[in-house]
Each structure stands twice: as C-alpha cells, then as structure tokens.
Image: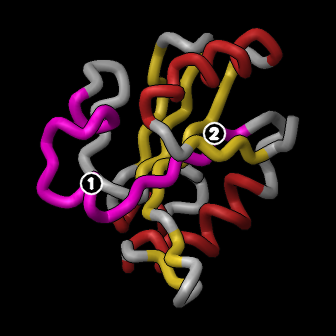
C-alpha cells in the first residue's frame, strides 16, 4: 500500500480506515477538493493555498499511511448531508480539513481553518 491512500468514495472511508488502523495506531486523514484533470487546478481555492504546508509539514513528515480523501465540488458545495459533513465521527465543516485519528475511533486533532494551515507547530 502506498503512503497516500486516495479515498474517492466516502462510503469506503470507514473500511479503509479500519484496514490502516490494523497497521498503525495513529492515522491522518486529509480532506480536500479534487483536482480537475483538464485544468490541473483544484476547485477549492483554500485547498490550493494550504497545499504547500500540508505537503511539507504533514505528508512529508508523517511516517505512516495517510488517507487522502478527495471530494468533487458538486457533491460537496451546498450539501449538508455529504457523508463527511454528516458523520458524527468526522464532522467535516469544509475543505481542506486534516484529522488526526487515534485507534480508528477518536479524532484527537483537527485543522480546518486558514490559521490552522499556517500554524506549522499544529501541522
């Protein structure tokens, strides 16, 4: 398995998290907009701004596997019942969001606003 495990279907998130949790106690999940292959750009401008710090201070430094959960604009924007938003476990308010998940059961750290993605110590 690769370090970044891309999750495109939110209904598969828990199954993938359960598999990764068997190998490591602490898991990072990154929720971000999807990149349009035609333009090479993410539909989410905040995701583009946060991307360099996420790569440098999270992806490049975390020794374990990372769930990289991508969402398309149509299913995310204006959809309060999107599985990542409606989940009582994940409670994603927007993208980008980074969750630190302990034992597959507890979200122990959450980065979800512009200040969080500029806070190198938090990342």
Between 68 and 121, the one nearer to me in the picture: 68
Looking at the image, residue 72 sits to the left or right of residue 31; the answer is left
Instruction: Decide: is 106 above or below 78.
Output: above
Between 97 and 34, the one nearer to me in the picture: 34
Q: Which mark is residue 112?
A: none
| Furthest-front residue in this view | 38
Q: Residue at x 65, y 28 (%)?
A: 27
At which x and y percent is residue 74? 26, 61
> Tag count in the figure?
2
User: Which numbered disc flags the more N-terminal residue, 2 or 1?
Assistant: 2
**What is the basis of the colouring in this image?**
secondary structure
Instruction: Decide: is 67 above or below 17.
Output: below
Could you tell me if the residues under marks 2 and 1 are in contact, i.e. CB atoms within 8 Å?
Answer: no
Q: Which quarter of the figure has residue 62?
A: top right
At which x and y percent is residue 19? 71, 16
Q: Could you tell me which quadrant the N terminus lies in?
A: top right
At which x and y percent is residue 83? 30, 33
Q: CA distance from mark 2 to mark 1?
A: 18 Å
Asked if residue 72 is among those painted magenta in the image, a careful observer would answer yes
Looking at the image, residue 116 sits to the left or right of residue 14; the answer is left
Looking at the image, residue 114 sits to the left or right of residue 51; the answer is left
Residue bounds of the magenta highlight: 66-86
Question: Dot 1: few (<14), some (14–19), or many (≥20) neighbours within 10 Å?
Answer: some
Instruction: Decide: is 117 above or below 94.
Output: below
Q: Residue at x 49, y 46 (%)?
A: 98
Q: Which mark is residue 76?
A: 1
Q: Secondary structure at mark 1?
A: helix
The residue to which callout 2 is attached is 67
Q: Secondary structure at mark 2?
A: strand
At which x and y percent is residue 52? 63, 74
């Amino acid at each position: 398995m690769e370090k970044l495990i891309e999750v495109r279907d939110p209904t598969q998130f828990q199954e993938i998290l359960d598999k990764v949790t068997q190998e490591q106690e602490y898991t990072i999940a990154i929720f971000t907009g999807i990149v349009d292959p035609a333009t090479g750009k993410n539909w989410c401008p905040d995701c583009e701004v946060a991307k360099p710090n996420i790569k440098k201070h999270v992806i490049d430094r975390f020794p374990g596997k990372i769930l990289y959960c991508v969402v398309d604009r149509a299913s995310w924007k204006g959809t309060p019942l999107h599985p990542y938003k409606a989940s009582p476990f994940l409670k994603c308010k927007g993208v980008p969001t980074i969750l630190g998940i302990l034992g597959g059961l507890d979200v122990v750290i959450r980065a979800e606003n512009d200040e969080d993605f500029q806070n190198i110590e938090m990342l």
